């Protein structure tokens, strides 16, 4: 089953990465709201596969959700931008992120409650869980139909980087704009930050839970702690998104870089604590008895592990909310191509992270995160400072 799940993840992220190049064209033709509905339907179909799972259906569903993810992420980034102004883009990004990550908290708590005390998952429990998830997904899809259209005053004061008149843009032009944006200095610098969000996404969503579950010092609680860890990651995401959303006026006054710096410090602290708390071989379940199994400096502590889960979520919300904010601010007329490029780079590095996660010891995976974290943070600072300077001088176009 491990090979099937790994193959499914590989298909999802591979299709996701490639499909991001076509997503702006879909959004250009269908519009952001209709595109989000199309993507959401793909998610519903993927969830439905697990009610009566078959290998071929899982692989087909992986392709569908890869396509749907590219469309829905690009469309919701575009929708967020077109319904925001310079004053509200930071607030809206934070609120969006907090609401999005509620699924991580409540979903993990629901699954933990349903699976608690069960060594194997029987068909009745599996069907019950996935039917509930499917119903929630369908209701969410229907809610997309009540979203408003763009107001005339939205986007009027946002920057526009390297862009001309995009009125009447067609699908081919949307694709060409993606290529053009990729060549800009601003997007190349932000690409380092995008890459970091992909690596850390893989770590907190897949690797860290495995590390906790493979830590023998946690005894019989090791596996159940995985669900609790996911819930605390979600709590950190929600708290960060809500705080940065409600503090949108402070962001407008002081810029996005303090929040990125805060997220960087939080993540570096989490990585250090994880390094000293968990076994170096914990990402690799096959290695359990050699000397590298034991923690580096301290005995493994489950409470410290859960604290790190919260810090991982809080730091992730810092980076993602500000990436959404700066993309919406800099590329109001090219929001679909800009967000597609963001997700393209993020999905590529996430896929790379899933690949090496089963081969590298924990210390080397943390080193990769630290290196890209430093590079991504510095690159974001460079773009933010240039954007802030241009905005103060009254420029509406860079380059």
Image: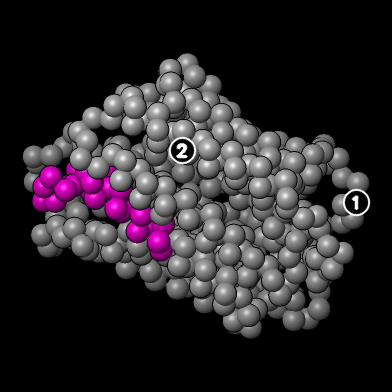
Image position, residue 192 (x, y; %): 53, 56
Q: Is residue 115 left or right of residue 174?
A: left
Image position, residue 261 (x, y; %): 47, 73
Identity of the residue drawn at 64% across and 65% down: 92
Residue behind mark 2: 132
Which mark is on residue 167?
1
Q: Secondary structure at mark 2?
A: helix
Q: Nearer the viewer, mark 1 or mark 2?
A: 2
Q: Quadrant of the C terminus?
A: bottom right
Q: In the image, which residues are magenta?
A: 209-236
For residue 354, above or below residue 382: above
Report, in whole angstroms, how far the alpha carbon at label 1 lies from the one at label 2.
42 Å
Which mark is on residue 281?
none
Q: Do the residues under discs 1 and 2 have CB atoms within 8 angstroms?
A: no
Q: Is residue 16 left or right of residue 284?
A: right
Identity of the residue drawn at 74% across and 75% down: 390
Q: Quadrant of the N terminus?
A: top left
**Along the line of sight, which residue is nearer the eye, 41 or 154?**
41
Residue 235 magenta: yes
Image position, residue 321 (x, y; %): 56, 63
Residue 214 magenta: yes
Q: Secondary structure at mark 1?
A: loop
């Amino acid at each position: 089953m491990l090979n099937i799940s790994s193959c499914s993840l590989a298909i999802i992220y591979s299709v996701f990465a490639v499909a991001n190049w076509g997503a702006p064209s879909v959004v250009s033709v269908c519009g952001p709201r209709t595109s989000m509905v199309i993507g959401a339907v793909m998610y519903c179909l993927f969830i439905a596969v697990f009610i009566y799972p078959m290998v071929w259906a899982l692989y087909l569903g992986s392709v569908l959700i890869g396509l749907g993810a590219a469309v829905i992420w690009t469309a919701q980034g575009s929708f967020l931008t077109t319904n925001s102004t310079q004053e509200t883009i930071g607030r809206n990004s934070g609120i969006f992120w907090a609401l999005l990550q509620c699924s991580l908290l409540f979903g993990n708590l629901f699954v933990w409650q349903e699976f608690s005390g069960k060594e194997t998952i029987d068909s009745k429990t599996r069907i019950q869980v996935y039917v509930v998830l499917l119903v929630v997904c369908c209701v969410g899809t229907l809610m997309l139909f009540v979203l408003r259209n763009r107001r005339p005053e939205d986007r009027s004061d946002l920057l526009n980087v390297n862009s001309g008149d995009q009125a009447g843009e067609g699908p081919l032009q949307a694709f060409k704009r993606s290529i053009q944006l990729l060549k800009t200095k601003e997007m190349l610098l932000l690409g380092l930050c995008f890459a970091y969000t992909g690596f850390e996404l893989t770590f907190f969503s897949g690797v860290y839970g495995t590390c906790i579950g493979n830590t023998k010092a946690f005894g019989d609680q090791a596996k159940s702690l995985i669900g609790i860890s996911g819930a605390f990651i979600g709590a950190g995401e929600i708290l960060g998104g809500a705080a940065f959303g409600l503090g949108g006026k402070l962001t407008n006054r002081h810029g996005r870089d303090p929040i990125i710096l805060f997220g960087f410090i939080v993540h570096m602290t989490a990585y250090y604590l994880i390094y000293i708390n968990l076994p170096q071989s914990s990402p690799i379940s096959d290695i359990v008895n050699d000397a590298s199994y034991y923690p580096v400096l301290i005995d493994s502590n489950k409470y410290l592990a859960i604290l790190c889960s919260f810090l991982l979520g809080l730091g992730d919300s810092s980076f993602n909310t500000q990436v959404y904010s700066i993309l919406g601010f800099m590329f109001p007329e090219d929001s679909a191509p800009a967000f597609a490029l963001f997700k393209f780079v993020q999905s590529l590095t996430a896929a790379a992270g899933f690949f090496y996660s089963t081969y590298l010891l924990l210390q080397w995976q943390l080193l990769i995160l630290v290196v890209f974290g430093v590079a991504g943070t510095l690159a974001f600072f460079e773009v933010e400072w240039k954007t802030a300077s241009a905005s103060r001088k009254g420029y509406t176009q860079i380059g």
